[in-house]
Image (spheres, rainbow, N blue to C red):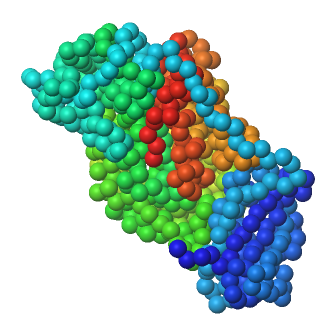
Amino acid sequence: MQPVSYRLESAWQPDGGPFGRFTFTLVNLSDHPLSDFRLVYTSLTRVIDSAACENAVFLRRNANFHEFAPPKGLVLGAGESWTFTVSGLHRQAKHCTDGAKSAYLTLSDGRHVPVAVSDLLLEGAASDPPPQRLPEGKLDLPFALQPWPVKIDVVPGDGFPVVLYPAAGSSKDEIRAVDTALALFHRLFPGGHAPFTLASSPQGRPILFAEKPELGSEAYALTFSEREIRVEYGAAAGRQYGLTTLAQLLDGARRERGKFRFPVSGTISDRPRYGWRGCHLDVSRQFYPTADVMRLIDILAWFKLNIFHWHLTDDEAWRLEIKACPTLTTLGVLRGPDEPMLPQLGNGAEPVGGFYSQEEVRAIVAHAGALNVEVVPEIDIPGHSTAALVALPELADGQEAPESYHSVQGYPNNALNPAIPLTYEFLEKVFDEMVELFPSQYIHIGGDEVANGSWLASPLARKLMEEEGISGTFALQSYFLKKVKQMLTARGRKLAGWNEVAHGGGVGTEGTLLMAWENPQVGIELAREGYDVVMTPGQAYYLDMAQAEAFQEPGASWAGTATPAHTYAYEAEGEFPEELKHRMKGLQACIWSEHFLSRGYFNRLVFPRLSAIAEAAWTPKSQKDWLRFAAIAPLSPIL
């Protein structure tokens, strides 16, 4: 690894302005003087007052991209530093990840060179270390199960079988199911002792299978004895969940003998609390290689989650190959100093891209399907479409002022225009290819965070609104989304979206599933309007939220902080009126990637909260136990 030539240190003072003040220090670690340069950094804490800057010249900002110049004539000698302050911020910094996520210099000859950055320091106030996330925990029953089953009445044994294997007479599908569970364990715990074998073993215990459709497709029942284990299952998913339970029991008993045990007799009867048990992954802000996506799906299967919501497009990149529109994954994914899109969210001097080919998508969908995980794809429209508009500039109204509105993330004019016929031709092509790639009954179309005021400066949009008797941004959004829903219905698909799909008149409730993310009350209101709802409130189920108020705790906090204990205890249907509970289809974790610049931050923020949400989605409220969960959670796999 080459040593860095420049480093940018950042600190935040709470009393330096309406929302505090950044102090940046650029250190020249090279052997040569530095002059006539520009400094770029990316930060989610954005500058909105360009004049509130001392000892530097603010040049421009685009969303999280910020560019500055030093005072005229500044020469930074070898080993010297340049310090400047910025106080015109749009919000206060609350956590160590709220400063510069990346930086680079543009030199006088046009070259871009990397600048190392560190997490933000806090000055002028106490900076306490993050608290412990999990207590030691306490077990009333010594079994390593996540999520905890509906009913467990088993006796712990003094020992455990070396391995479990399908009994003689098992069907081909049952033997394959054991092989699938074995392969899943090997991928998640490559150093662990395999819980299954396909060959009989005198040191093992046979598994007898019995299909019982009356149990329900995701239900299973286990009966233990010293001679054998009986697995009754409703369908393939229930069989897989029963085998996963056996793998967890045996792995726990083997890894922590004494603390965890394996049953010698008794029964476990189990079925999920909700039909929709999801996890979302934003791959637009940060790109995750196919292998990482597949491993996350493996982890979902281990926790008996059954929906992978794949957020494939956003302002920052369009990640899904659409053969009819190749520029989406050439121009629409490249971020860099000289690329179609500027660096954002941790990008620096080197260009970054990344997308999923249709071949990779098919492999991921097949991988998930083998584990009874449904892949629900999302293209985020009409807002969050900067990447699509960069790739296809003909979708913009050329008469519209360049920055007539900004999204909440700071992107100018980032929504597909409902008044441009090419918009619908484009979406027809996209949906035609998506339905061939994704067998899910749902296609998620986003529909969130369209800025109030969008399109109002577009002459084409104003003309359409006058012709259709439409008033305001959200009524025009409703007009657009109704057309999108018609496209999906024509292709045999249902519309899923974020809760803002209901704005301005919404879309038809039949065959529509909306995700309540802004707050829990929104879900109840949507149910009252007749929508089916998945609860994914940012206050509990957004896994990019910081886990404590401590400044040294990484993550976002616009929705507050969510400790693992809070996430575990949260009851999404707690305030739902009884007559509306049938509208609540389930729960979902959301992994938004603005802060996930490293594998370490990903694992720290996602785990153990993901398994806490999995238990909330599966386990009845009466069976939840925080201290038991805390004792078992350290056994969980991570990315």
In which quarter of the view is residue 553 placed? top right
Instruction: Decide if residue 309 is in sight here.
Output: no
In which quarter of the view is residue 37 placed? bottom right
Q: Nearer the viewer, residue 501 or 305?
A: 305
Q: Nearer the viewer, residue 381 or 110?
A: 110
User: Which residue lies at the image location 36% right of the left edge and 42% below the top edge?
Assistant: 189
In which quarter of the view is residue 439 placed? top left
Q: Nearer the viewer, residue 418 or 522?
A: 522
**Image position, residue 145 (x, y; %):** 42, 24
User: Which residue lies at the image location 41% right of the left edge and 57% below the top edge?
Assistant: 289
User: Which residue lies at the image location 77% right of the left edge and 56% below the top edge?
Assistant: 121
Query: Relative to residue 426, is residue 307 depicted above or below?
Result: above
Q: From the viewer's perspective, is 89 left or right of 383?
A: right
Q: Nearer the viewer, residue 426 or 272?
A: 272
**Image position, residue 187 (x, y; %):** 33, 45
Q: In the displayed image of the protein, which residue is found farthest to the left? A: 169
Query: Relative to residue 367, is residue 28 depicted above or below?
Result: below
Q: From the viewer's perspective, is 512 left or right of 556?
A: left
Instruction: Decide if residue 1 is in sight here.
Output: yes
Q: From the viewer's perspective, is 525 left or right of 373?
A: right
**Image position, residue 470 (x, y; %):** 62, 44
